[in-house]
Image: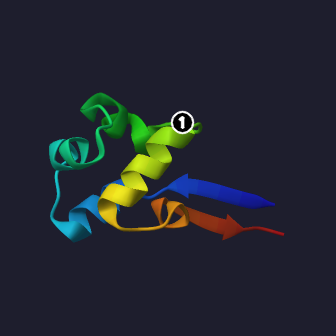
Amino acid sequence: MVIVKPNLTPLLKDMGLTQMDLSDKSGVPQGTISRFDKNSRHEANHLFSIAKALGVTIEELFIVEHEE
């Protein structure tokens, strides 16, 4: 089984960015960014916009754990 957990908050902290900074860079509303780590579903266009603005891959926006 694969468990996928959002990893946006730690990425922003490591990069010294706020949610508003990311909103400005990505064009994704700050409210959407605020809910990112709480949601189990994400809009594809938001994923691509956020990843591009941060200079990371979409995979890096998440923590993937494998359970047997």
Q: Which quadrant holds the N terminus?
A: bottom right
The image position of residue 46, as x and y in percent, is 45, 41
Please state the horizontal and vertical placement of residue 25, each as a whole percent of the image: 22, 49
| Amino acid, disc 1 | Glu
Percent coordinates x, y for residue 22 in the rendering: 24, 49
User: Where 29 sits versus 50, above or below?
Assistant: above
In the displayed structure, does residue 59 sit left or right of residue 53? right
Rendered residue at 47%/50% (across/down): 48
Number of labelled discs? Answer: 1
State left or right for residue 46 relative to residue 3: left
Q: Which residue is mark 1?
A: 43
Instruction: Give the vertical position of 18 relative to 38 (above or below).
Output: below
Between residues 64 and 59, which one lies in front from this camera angle? 59
Q: Quadrant of residue 56?
A: bottom left
Relative placement, left or right, of 57 versus 32 is right
Callout 1 environment at 10 Å: few (<14), some (14 to 19), or many (20+)? few
Instruction: Name the residue: 43% across, 45% down.
Output: 37
Tell me: residue 58, above or below residue 30: below
Q: Nearer the viewer, residue 11 or 51?
A: 51
Q: Quadrant of the C terminus?
A: bottom right
Question: In this rendering, would 61 be left or right of 33?
Answer: right
